[in-house]
Amino acid sequence: MNTFQPTLKPFKWNPHPKPTTIFFNTQNQIDPKTPQSSTSSAGKIKRTVLTKQGRTKFDITPDRNFYTYPRFVTHVDNNFITTLTNLYRDRLSPDFEILDLMSSWVSHLPENVKYKRVIGHGLNPQELAKNPRLDYFVVKDLNQDQKFEFESGSFDAVLCTVSVQYLEQPEKVFAEVFRLLRPGGVFIVSFSNRMFYEKAIGAWREGTGFGRVQLVVQYFQCVEGFTEPEVVRKLPDGKKPDISSSFDWIKGVFGLLSGSDPFYAVIAYKNFKPIYE
């Protein structure tokens, strides 16, 4: 991994430093326009969704260690990706400023659409630097620190693709997304049935497809100010895959054959006016 050399500035002692987020552009250079922190007006968390046990992982080591080495692979099949790209084409306007949360080397945005600005977030800078859609990116562990240094109302859309299952504090993350969105902004959370099992939280590991959808719906509902979540599903048609070898049979058992990945997306918008129960 490359060594990043920022421009040195006079050091000023701060006895109570805040956690730092590092911004990079896609040339692996620290971005000179790193936004400064501002007073947050994030949506109120009305209730806790997960129990302590529901947040636990088999692998309790820091996620940053797990993602030290890049994985230049897609974690879902082509049918899932096509469905997701079409959803983005339908919901995202070219003049949008977008935050791609927990991103990697690919964002699945429509290739023929140029957006105003796309900022990536993740844990592996090598993966993010390879993503051609990102104007720049942020390296941050959301299980350690849920606050970004962007100003409130910075984005028209926030995306989270096949990664929500790894959030240990989803209520706080969804509240932070609410803060970052402009009024009317959209948050699209998509997922399937695949995961790094040792890094998924207990509530996700033990859930079903329906249960996981309801879990994400509750994440939205626990933050005051989101619209009622919309659920988009596209499930396999039930046809048996063409298994021509024992290797294909093994791939089918583990859901690795093309067309075998169910598609789920939960979508909600930041209200123009707060809704009170």
Image: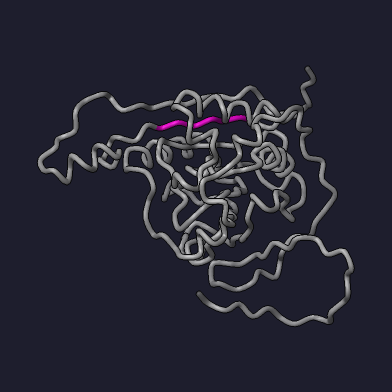
The picture places residue 68, in percent across and down from the top left corner, at 50, 64
Question: Seen in the image, is 105 located left or right of residue 46?
Answer: left
Q: Is residue 197 above or below residue 72?
A: above
> Number of labelled discs?
0
Residue 228 among magenta residues: no
Here the colouring is one colour
Prevalent SS, magenta region: strand
Q: Which residue is located at x 79 percent, y 20 percent?
A: 276
Please identify the quarter of the rendering in which residue 275 is found: top right
Please identify the quarter of the rendering in which residue 20 is found: bottom right
Q: Which residue is located at x 43 percent, y 43 percent?
A: 195
Viewer-nearest residue: 8 or 64: 64
* Magenta segment boundaries in residue numbering: 263-268
Question: Seen in the image, is 96 located left or right of residue 172?
Answer: left
Task: Answer yes or no: is residue 120 visible.
Answer: no
The picture places residue 161, in percent across and down from the top left corner, at 49, 43
Q: Is residue 31 above or below residue 200?
A: below
Q: Which residue is located at x 24 percent, y 43 percent?
A: 251
